Amino acid sequence: DTAVSQTPKYLVTQMGNDKSIKCEQNLGHDTMYWYKQDSKKFLKIMFSYNNKELIINETVPNRFSPKSPDKAHLNLHINSLELGDSAVYFCASSLDSSYGYTFGSGTRLTVV
Amino acid sequence: GEDVEQSLFLSVREGDSSVINCTYTDSSSTYLYWYKQEPGAGLQLLTYIFSNMDMKQDQRLTVLLNKKDKHLSLRIADTQTGDSAIYFCAETTGNTGKLIFGQGTTLQVKP
């Protein structure tokens, strides 16, 4: 199936831990994104990579570090997790901005 | 600056039309989008409109764009219970492809 796939779908972890979320797209898109959706459903961009190059880096704590080993993968590593990091994290990809994004199904991160 | 605003909630009866409204501030927006999010799922692109268009129709969906007032609307004809979801308006500007989303409108369809 052609899609954007994220793993894991659910992640429950304790404060202070380090965790990673993986994202892969097989659509041949050049650009990938990470968005955070908070408890009020507000979506905010965190990072964007175009062909493995970082092009958007919004005001995000430096505990969050994206890594793009190739243009089909964009992973998100989070150090020293805090309660406020609890959210749904969405990966997305696009061919170019005019066609909109294809989203993954999200990773629900709960920090306890 | 970039800001997208939507009303938070809309309730309609099955079979009625739904109209979801959105306003945006960035006059250089090139494309405007409507996304649908069902519970526990990701966002699904419903439709989009280029900024030099006034209207776009796609089956039960009609998008109207008033560029002067920076107002975008999504009309769903013959609304069904399966249309119950959160609808996000979004704009993209510049060449980074960054999408700015509204807060989302929860559409409740009553049988």
Image (cartoon, helix red, strand yellow):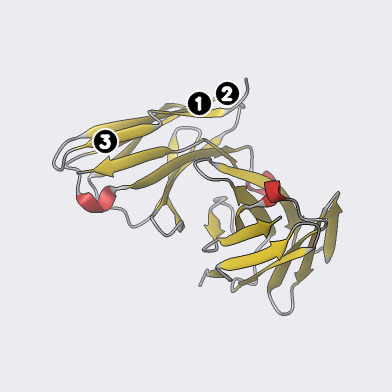
| Residue at point 64%, 68% (across, down) | B28
Residue placed under numbered mark 1 in the picture? A72
Name the residue type under label 2: Asn
User: Chain for mark 2?
Assistant: A
Q: Are marks 1 and 2 in contact (CB under 8 Å)?
A: yes
Mark 3 vs mark 2, CA separation in Å: 27 Å
Camera-nearest label, 1 or 2 = 2
Q: Are marks 1 and 2 on the same chain?
A: yes
Tag on residue B108?
A: none
Q: Earlier in the sequence, mark 3 or mark 2?
A: 3
Can residue A8 be seen here? yes
Residue A105 percent location from the top left of the image: 51, 36
Q: Name above or below for residue A65 compared with residue B67.
A: above
Camera-nearest label, 1 or 3 = 3
| Residue at point 50%, 26% (across, down) | A72
Q: What crowding class fits label 3: few (fewer than 14 Cα within 10 Å), some (14-19), or many (20 or more)? A: few
Can residue B92 be seen here? no
Name the residue type under label 3: Val
User: Chain for mark 3?
Assistant: A
> Splitting the image into 4 quarters, where does residue A34 fall?
top left
The answer to whether B45 appears left or right of B3 in the picture is right
Residue B52 percent location from the top left of the image: 80, 64
Residue placed under numbered mark 3 in the picture? A12
Q: What crowding class fits label 2: few (fewer than 14 Cα within 10 Å), some (14-19), or many (20 or more)? A: some
